[in-house]
Image (cartoon, grey):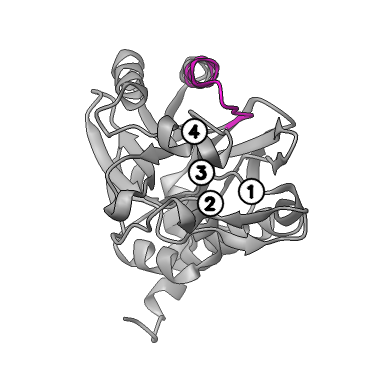
Amino acid sequence: MHLIAAAQMVSTADKAHNLEVATRLVRQAAKLGARLVGLPENFSWMGSESERASAAESLEGPTLGRMAELARELRVTVLAGSLLETGAPGGRLYNTSVLFGPQGERLAVYRKMHLFDVEVGDGATYHESAAVAPGTEVVAATTDVGRLGLSVCYDLRFPELYRRLSRDGATLLAVPAAFTLMTGKDHWEVLLRARAIENQCYVLAPAQGGRHSDKRITYGHAMVVDPWGLVTARASEGEGLALAPVDAELQQRIRRNLPCLEHRRLLD
């Protein structure tokens, strides 16, 4: 049995401060015994759309370099929730999640597939695809606590992605997010629990939670959900951690007694 931790942050346009907070939370989680620590979407920067390009980095940039060093130093697996990555077609960026193993090695790179182009009724219009290009690959990686399927935020609304991940052997699903307050209060927990139940997977859901600027508030409630769909840990407001165990025997028992993954008929 291993502990996992979902971090909650309130990132701003101040990269140095964000990295300090992320580092502190990862250290705190590791000290508490977590073997896998997840950071939220846009953990290193959340500023205005006009500054997106200047905030972006390559996979070899300083932010991910710091996360690799931290994973190696603490001997834990670190999910760098997401950051803006340079190099997408047409001068756009990627919203990229990167997984580092306990030796600091890069285990996986996932680029967010579903982009947030919506009007949710909070007075703001979101058009992520104006600056961000969608990824094209479904990504899972083997870790010390199980096979981890990667996703980011808005992906949560597309169950076919998670069905593919579970079919590819995922026992744990990562959903680093920056859900809006408007959508989060009604949909965040419901969707996380649904993805856990239908795929009989643990769900690690790091989150942004608080006021980032005059125009941006996120819902928060970072959490861990077990394969039965129960929320086993939840962060409070602002910065914090949600820690809970991953029990492989419990997961195996659920899958054995209720073998719905073996009963699927509509497959790609």
Residue for badge 3: 176
Under mark 3, the amino acid is Pro
Q: Are marks 3 and 4 in contact (CB under 8 Å)?
A: yes
Mark 3 lies on a secondary structure that is: loop
Task: Report the Cα–Cα distance between label 3 and label 4.
Answer: 7 Å
Magenta highlight: main SS: helix
Q: Which residue is mark 2?
A: 153
Based on the displayed image, in which of its 4 quarters is residue 165 positioned?
bottom left
Q: Which residue is mark 1?
A: 179
> CB under 8 Å between callouts 2 and 3?
yes
Amino acid tagged 1? Phe
Horizontal and vertical percent position of residue 60: 24, 28
Label 1 close to label 3 by CB (< 8 Å): no
Q: Secondary structure at mark 4?
A: loop
Residue 190 on image: x %, y %: 67, 60
Residue 192 placement, left or right of 111:
right
Placement of 244 over or under 93, stated as above or below: above
Packing grade of label 1 (10 A; few <14, some 14-19, many >=20) is: many
Q: CA distance from mark 4 to mark 1?
A: 14 Å
Say which of marks 4 and 1 sits in front: 1
Cα separation between marks 2 and 1:
7 Å
One can see residue 40 in this view: no
Sequence order check, earlier mark of 3 and 4: 4
**The residue under label 4 is which amino acid type?**
Leu
What residue would you read off at disc 4? Answer: 39
Image height check: is 205 above or below 255? above
